[in-house]
Image: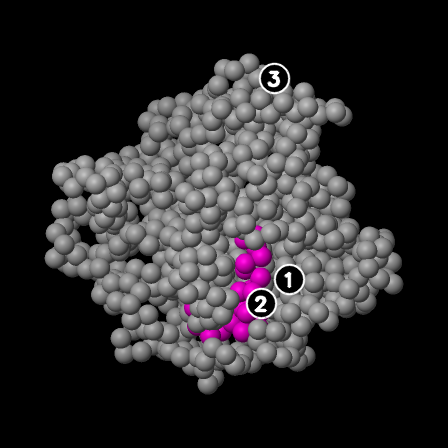
Amino acid sequence: MALDAKIPHGEMDKKWTDYKGHVKLVNPANKRKLEVIVVGTGLAGASAAASLGELGYKVKAFCFQDSPRRAHSIAAQGGINAAKNYQNDGDSVFRLFYDTVKGGDYRAREANVHRLAEVSTSIIDQCVAQGVPFAREYGGLLSNRSFGGTQVQRTFYAAGQTGQQLLLGAYSALERQVALGNVKMYTRHEMLDVVKIDDKARGIIARDLVSGELESHFGHAVLLCSGGYGNVFYLSTNAMGSNVTAAWKAHKKGAFFGNPCFTQIHPTCIPVSGDHQSKLTLMSESLRNDGRIWVPLKKEESRNPKDIPENERDYYLERRYPAFGNLVPRDVASRAAKERCDEGYGVGTTKMAVYLDYKDAIVRYGKIEAGKAGNDNLSHEEIVALGKKVVEEKYGNLFEMYQKITGENPYETPMRIYPAVHYTMGGLWVDYELQTTVKGLYALGEANFSDHGANRLGASALMQGLADGYFVIPYTLGNYLADEIHTNSISTDHSAFAEAQKAVSDRLNTLINIKGKQTVESFHKRLGKIIWDKCGMARSEKGLKQAIEEVRALKKEFWSDVRIPGEINSFNLELDKAGRVADLIELGELMCLDALDRNESCGGHFREESQTEDGEAKRDDENYAYVAAWENKGDSSWELHKEALSFDIVKPTQRSYK
Amino acid sequence: MEHYHMNLTLKVWRQKNSKEQGKLETYQVKGISSEMSFLEMFDVLNEQLIVDGKEPIAFDHDCREGICGMCSMYINGQAHGPWQQNTTCQLHMRAFKDGDTITVEPWRSKAFPVLKDLVVNRSAFDRIIQAGGFISVNTGNAVDANAIAIDKKDADDAFMAAACIGCGACVATCKNGSAMLFVGAKVSQLALLPQGGPERESRVLNMVAQMDKEGFGNCTNTYACEAECPKGISVSNIARLNSEYLKAGLTTETK
């Protein structure tokens, strides 16, 4: 099967306008007859469900949490990018497009990224209209800040809770449509299969997680907005429930999986403290705007960081990357931290951490405040006190979070940070219309692969989720559904639903009847360790080959020795988790396979075999300028399809932040 | 921080489903690190229960960083436990000492029925939002984001109210099971912003009507909700809710 990305012809900056001008429309009377299923209610899902409900489609939305407001988009901290150029600092749609393609290390599709940059401005308008309380200046207009990997201030934010505020905005729009009867909401429901009829997606099998019963739901189209798969690493900044199951079921039903090995390791997370750890907590990247990252110059340094003098500190990002300093993109910052720790300069009890220091920022802000008040006779302590207030206003909630977890006061002692898995750029392969390789099956937000290439820039995930849901799918879905107006709703008595439901039921029965000795959690931890060690921040042919063998062995062991207590037809959290871990194990194998195939370093994917003399990632455009789209061919068997990437506007160069 | 390990006695509410009676059961956990989070301590206990062939304790949790609002334990008589402005998932074991007995119950409120063990049904909150916790603006309707300047103080106050995570600790804490802090926070956020103006009156009337219909109790100004709120949502939002409600009641024709 040849992959067709369906990129519209014409000039890059006219493609989306032309597409919208010529796309098929569905008249309002027909929209009422068309049913759409939305799986997941994060930024992509909630915005899509609300927007499609507003248009008049009959929407059913599903989430596994107890309310759509809990989806993990809520935890995004730093902000959302938009090419508004409110700061008059040279930003434009083109710049945002350019930065995103470059930041993605030339492994994203130009046309998609350009569209993303174009609609970014409408997202901010929409959110403000919904009552999202973004940060403002004293004049009453919106405030911006800068973020890693860019040189303009284009990030809109609501303290360190931007994801929360954006999600609550989308959630309120969604609940409004629920009240109007345009959307029916199914909470505590998990999608366990896609139903296909005549090669088109026509519905899903979902499990009511309270009663444990299986349900069939018909839809003229199915939208997967189910997020990323960072939990394959066990420890990640994802929520505990985040999983790959919906995307994986789609993959098994014919949707190709794009670039599964492209995962993002975020540089500023709170380090692991022990074996009991269940998840990692991110400290927003915005902290790098004012904080300085360093390690001691001396190995085996045992002094309190406050007592280490300036000339014995190595501000290694500022040293290695003078142009961007502490604001280099995430992949670069993460690898640099790993390099220092691997060399033995790490700090803290585990020696797997670096310092993020606010000492200088506090003094700098304190002096500004003193200057504003015309007070130049202040003592150092008084300046520090003023500076702390400013830092508290900007980052207070993050500092508080750090203190709660570690018990240390970051205003006094430098924070300890280390990289952690945060986001997955890979996901279901989609064309320009966000349609997967299964007709009528779409993937939005983090669940698809499309816009971030091999590395996502900060504050771009919220932008993409909302772009897909508010401003892309309402147009592209119509183009498909316009040809479906003659398809009447199909009864869930249809044999395709019965067969799919039986297959799901059989699998649940198999799982619960294994009655082995080991817990689901213990398998998940072991999977995470394999993937983190061998398919994490650095990857090699030898390690990946070993990992594939280990994951296969783990899968076999899981299916013969997992222990799941309780019954199927009941509220059974262990059974829910078992199904998800089983899917993550299979995905883990594909990730390693993909990482093995891509014998180049790009973005977050670092192959040890492919690096420059000074240890920077070395891309290989001649051989690897493609999207790897994997077709499932049964158990542990995949066929690789390649979508060649062409760069007409942003000419690939070796990324340099020096 | 000084690390230490502890042995604890847990008394945990077990209830098979919404229909059956529940009761407190006692468990011993050993070797708990002071660096663990409270939920990680529960993970340890659950792993032990599974290995012993028993059913693990069901509890709600997801983000484990204090923002999704899913975790909901009533610990030693306090919603989200002993720390101020803190969710259960952020509570760490250094709050306890070796030999402690900890009692853990679900949220208790008529409007939040128990589904299993420590898991309750909070869908009433969603229905209150459906009644009016939104601004009626369809996708694509919006004008430029900087077209309306908003006083920074109003924007900041709106944000403070919007920081509510919808966990329900206020309801669980209130002796009347009142949801006034939750409703007040949303009404305040939207009343403080000019975008919320057109629906200001119908919003407050409809949300309060839904709140009453769901079986939440009345507010008698004990302020326990504010004291236990993990996000420090202020009771001044309840005052604003009352004032909005009164004004809307006086000026709206249809009620």
Residue lying at 35% horizontally and 40% vertically, measured from the top left: A393
Q: How would you rate the neighbour count of disc 1 (Cα within 10 Å): few for under 14, some for 14-19, many for 20 or more?
A: many
The disc, 2 or 1, on the residue closer to the chain's N-terminal end is: 2
Label 1 is placed on what type of residue? Val
Question: Looking at the image, which residue sits at the far bottom?
Answer: A622
Distance from Cα at disc 2 to Cα at disc 3: 50 Å
Q: Chain of mark 3?
A: B
Q: Is residue A106 magenta?
A: yes
Q: Nearer the viewer, mark 2 or mark 3?
A: 2
Residue lying at 25% horizontally and 43% vertically, measured from the top left: A372
Residue B163: x %, y % from top left: 49, 37
- B103 and A139: which one is in front? A139
Residue B16: x %, y % from top left: 63, 30
Labels 2 and 3 share a subunit? no
The answer to whether A206 appears left or right of A377 in the picture is right
Residue bearing mark 1: A472
Residue bearing mark 3: B218
Labels 2 and 1 share a subunit? yes
Our reading of the magenta stretch's main secondary structure is helix
Residue A119: x %, y % from top left: 58, 61
The answer to whether B157 appears left or right of A477 in the picture is left
Distance from Cα at disc 2 to Cα at disc 1: 9 Å
Labels 1 and 3 share a subunit? no
- B149 and A535: which one is in front? B149
Residue lying at 52% horizontally and 26% vertically, measured from the top left: B237
Q: Which residues are magenta?
A: A103-125
Label 3 is placed on what type of residue? Asn
Residues marked 2 and 3 touching at CB (< 8 Å): no
Q: How would you rate the neighbour count of disc 2 (Cα within 10 Å): few for under 14, some for 14-19, many for 20 or more?
A: many
Residues marked 2 and 1 touching at CB (< 8 Å): yes
Residue bearing mark 2: A115
Local secondary structure at mark 3: loop
